[in-house]
């Protein structure tokens, strides 16, 4: 039996005080490690609220489990708003509600900024040090030294027993790894960008149903809205960069207002700051990043630094938090045996990171194209019925990803198989009328 042995002298550097870096720091200081975080940005807790820089987050089972494991989840409950399903807005303003799962299964709208601020505060309270305005220039992988530009602009060298790159999609730690032999790296952009917009409270109340993620699917583009604690909604427009209806084509105020009132007629009147938001807030790209290995010597990548994904499954943060939980479990098992921990970490997480990247891209098509399709709604009803009758044999892909710990790679594999089965079921020309009379048992038998 392997006995986990941990040295109290071990010191760990985390590059990046974002969501994943801050949560991982909480895990590590609770285990007695000396943890120092270097963050290139200034302390967001000291700044006034700045909009337009991030998408509201959907915190679901995987992320919540990690917060619960650290014992800090109760501190975040007050800033979460549960969303029971999707509220679909068609072109005429008609509403259709699609539950995410069974009764009681919800995802939670949470402000990225507020969650990040709270996690940084908890990490510091537990004993982690955070140095702001401290940019990582390079990592000396052989000697486990981080070269940091301090707030005065001077480079300093900091040595550690372990260096963790939690510095996001455009990671400086990963850049150092890219210079090594046989390092695979790829990035791909979707042709769409996103712009954050707002829908203020109306007469002190939510302008729409608060316990739902609102979607305006319009084929090649869409608008979504997530509720906030101040009774506003954070809206995000996903639109091609170029083309007839695109960020490129919407430059003038009249064009912007005409597009919104024609395309999102029930939302536009409620977005009272639309003109200013659209012209002021940045248009940002959507990138997927994959790389391997995640480990060089005693330096490891985690979260977006290792596996950035597009936001259409709401799993970017949840996957990063799950990284932290898995890493913590390996510490419990192997103590300070870093070689074993790091190799086991990338071995277990890499296939799942690749899987959620693919799942997120697939879900983009579903959200913008399919959720308004009547046949798609029938398909979801059939799958819900299958899950009701055969809860162990037929778990919908969305449920596996969002409400369980089933590995993403398994969810993708099983989801692809079930999609093929459902494609066959949906070829019945009378399916809309006859779906409740299907032989559900014979459908489930096709899984094995």
Image (spheres, rainbow, N blue to C red):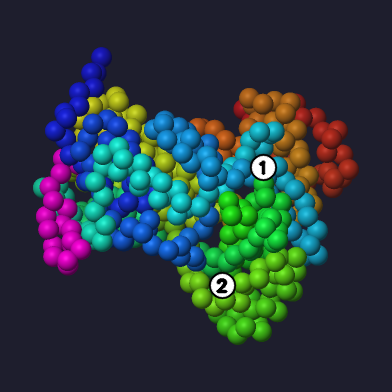
- Tell me the residue at 64%/45% (across/down): 83
Residue 74 seen in the current view: yes
* Location of mark 2 (residue): 277
Left or right of 280, for residue 375: right
**Vertical arrangement, residue 352 with respect to residue 253, above or below:** above
**Vertical arrangement, residue 329 with respect to residue 279, above or below:** above
Asked if residue 245 is among those painted magenta in the image, a careful observer would answer no
N-terminal label among 1 and 2? 1
Q: Position of residue 446 (x, y in %)?
A: 67, 31
Between marks 1 and 2 in the image, the one whose residue lies nearer the viewer: 2
Q: Position of residue 421 (x, y in %)?
A: 68, 39
Q: Position of residue 381 (x, y in %)?
A: 76, 40
The image quadrant where one finds the C terminus is top right
The span picked out in magenta is 146-163
Tell me if mark 2 has few (under 14), some (14-19) or many (20+) residues whose alpha carbon lies within 10 angstroms of its own: some
Q: Which mark is residue 84?
A: 1
Q: Which mark is residue 324?
A: none
**Vertical arrangement, residue 227 with respect to residue 409, above or below:** below
Element type at mark 1: loop
**Residue closer to the observer: 312 or 420:** 312
Left or right of 277, for residue 214: right
């Amino acid at each position: 039996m392997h006995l986990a042995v941990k040295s109290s002298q071990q010191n760990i550097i985390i590059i990046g005080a974002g969501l994943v870096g801050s949560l991982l720091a909480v895990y590590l200081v609770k285990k007695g490690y000396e943890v120092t975080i270097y963050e290139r940005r200034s302390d967001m807790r000291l700044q006034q609220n700045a909009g337009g820089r991030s998408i509201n987050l959907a915190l679901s089972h995987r992320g919540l489990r990690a917060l619960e494991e650290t014992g800090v989840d109760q501190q975040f409950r007050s800033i979460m708003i549960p969303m029971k399903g999707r509220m679909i807005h068609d072109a005429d303003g008609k509403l259709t509600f699609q539950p995410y799962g069974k009764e009681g299964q919800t995802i939670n709208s949470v402000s990225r900024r507020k969650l990040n601020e709270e996690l940084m505060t908890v990490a510091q309270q537990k004993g982690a040090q955070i140095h702001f305005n401290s940019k990582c220039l390079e990592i000396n992988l052989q000697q486990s030294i981080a070269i940091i530009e301090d707030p005065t602009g001077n480079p300093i060298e900091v040595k550690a027993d372990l260096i963790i790159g939690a510095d996001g999609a455009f990671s400086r730690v990963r850049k150092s790894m890219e210079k090594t032999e046989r390092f695979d790296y790829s990035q791909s952009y979707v042709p769409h960008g996103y712009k954050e917009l707002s829908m203020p409270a109306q007469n002190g109340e939510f302008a729409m149903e608060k316990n739902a993620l609102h979607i305006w699917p319009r084929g090649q583009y869409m608008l979504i809205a997530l509720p906030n604690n101040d009774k506003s909604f954070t809206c995000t427009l996903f639109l091609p960069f170029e083309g007839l209806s695109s960020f490129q084509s919407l430059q003038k105020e009249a064009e912007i207002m005409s597009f919104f009132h024609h395309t999102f007629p029930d939302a536009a009147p409620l977005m009272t700051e639309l003109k200013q938001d659209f012209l002021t807030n940045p248009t940002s790209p959507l990138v997927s990043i994959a790389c391997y290995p995640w480990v060089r010597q005693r330096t490891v990548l985690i979260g977006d630094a290792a596996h950035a994904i597009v936001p259409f499954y709401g799993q970017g943060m949840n996957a990063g938090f799950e990284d932290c939980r898995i890493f913590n479990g390996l510490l419990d098992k192997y103590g300070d045996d870093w070689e074993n921990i790091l190799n086991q970490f990338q071995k277990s997480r890499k296939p799942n990171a690749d899987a959620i990247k693919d799942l997120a891209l697939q879900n983009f098509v579903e959200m913008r194209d399919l959720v308004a399709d009547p046949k798609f709604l029938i398909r979801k009803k059939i799958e819900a019925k299958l899950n009701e009758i055969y809860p162990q044999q037929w778990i919908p892909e969305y449920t596996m990803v969002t409400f369980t710990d089933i590995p993403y790679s398994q969810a993708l594999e099983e989801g692809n198989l079930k999609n093929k089965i459902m494609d066959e079921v949906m070829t019945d020309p009378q399916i809309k009328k006859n779906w409740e009379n299907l032989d559900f048992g014979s459908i489930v038998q096709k899984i094995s």
